[in-house]
Image: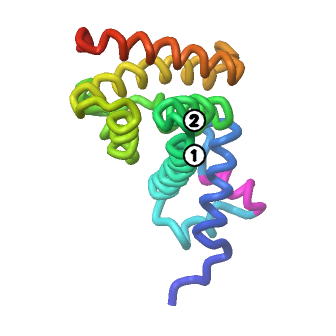
Amino acid sequence: MPPKAKFSREEIVEAALAIVREGGAGVLTSRALGERLDSSARPIFTVFRNMEEVQQAVFNAAKALYREYVQRGLAEKPAFKGVGTQYILFAVNEPKLFQLLFMTEHGQVPELSTVLPLIDESYEQILLSVQEGYGVDQITAEKLYRHLWIYSHGIAALCATGMCHFTGEEIGRMMTEVFVSLLKNRESLV
């Protein structure tokens, strides 16, 4: 009979997520996790096979938290601006988790036209918010989304790395200025 788990899967993931939030993904080790749980590392491996499985669970927990931000953004008016603002707020409030999800090198580099559906499970909802909110076709919505994501990702990366700080008002104004400019010149979008 396998040994009884000292900690639940949720307790281990919560502790691992706290470690990553504080120091980044690079500091998540079995030893650090054991110390956080006030234990040895051994009980972790009665629930998880290895640290890669723990890291994947932390990644999934970070994605779930990010999805909450997206849903808040989609509930705002206008929804698309809300999503962009929430993306940046996620970077401000959870810089290490933002770095884990959106600033980690990937083995296969996707084309720009396919990156958003790969990194954001809410892609279809966000795309629909552009189409419905601004009365544009799917192709135009995809182009607007892509351009605004590049812009908001730049702001978010600056915030997540501590390079710059923006107020909520500044973020809202910048997002509006760029979006309005793109919308006015949508025929020239690439």
Query: Mark 1 or 2 closer to N-term?
Result: 1
- The answer to whether the residue labelled 1 contacts the one labelled 2, judged by CB atoms less than 8 Å apart, is yes
Which of the two residues, 96 or 154, is positioned nearer the viewer here?
Answer: 154
**Does residue 83 sit above or below 158 in this rendering?**
below
Categorize mark 2 by other alpha carbons within 10 Å: few (<14), some (14-19), many (20+): many
Q: Position of residue 67 (x, y in %)?
A: 51, 48
**Does residue 77 sit above or below 2 in this rendering?**
above
Residue at 40% over, 46% down: 122
Magenta stretch: dominant secondary structure: helix
Categorize mark 1 by other alpha carbons within 10 Å: few (<14), some (14-19), many (20+): some
> What residue does disc 1 label?
72
Image-quadrant location for residue 130:
top left
Label 2 secondary element: helix
Which of the two residues, 145 or 128, is positioned nearer the viewer here?
Answer: 128
> What type is the residue that disc 2 sits on?
Gln
The magenta stretch spans residue 86: no
Q: How many marks?
A: 2
> What residue does disc 2 label?
86
- 156 horizontally vs 188: left or right: right
The residue segment tinted magenta is 30-38
Q: Position of residue 1 (x, y in %)?
A: 51, 90
| Mark-to-mark CA distance, 1 and 2 | 7 Å
Q: Note whether residue 62 is visible.
A: no
**Does residue 97 sit above or below 166 in this rendering?**
below
> What type is the residue that disc 1 sits on?
Arg
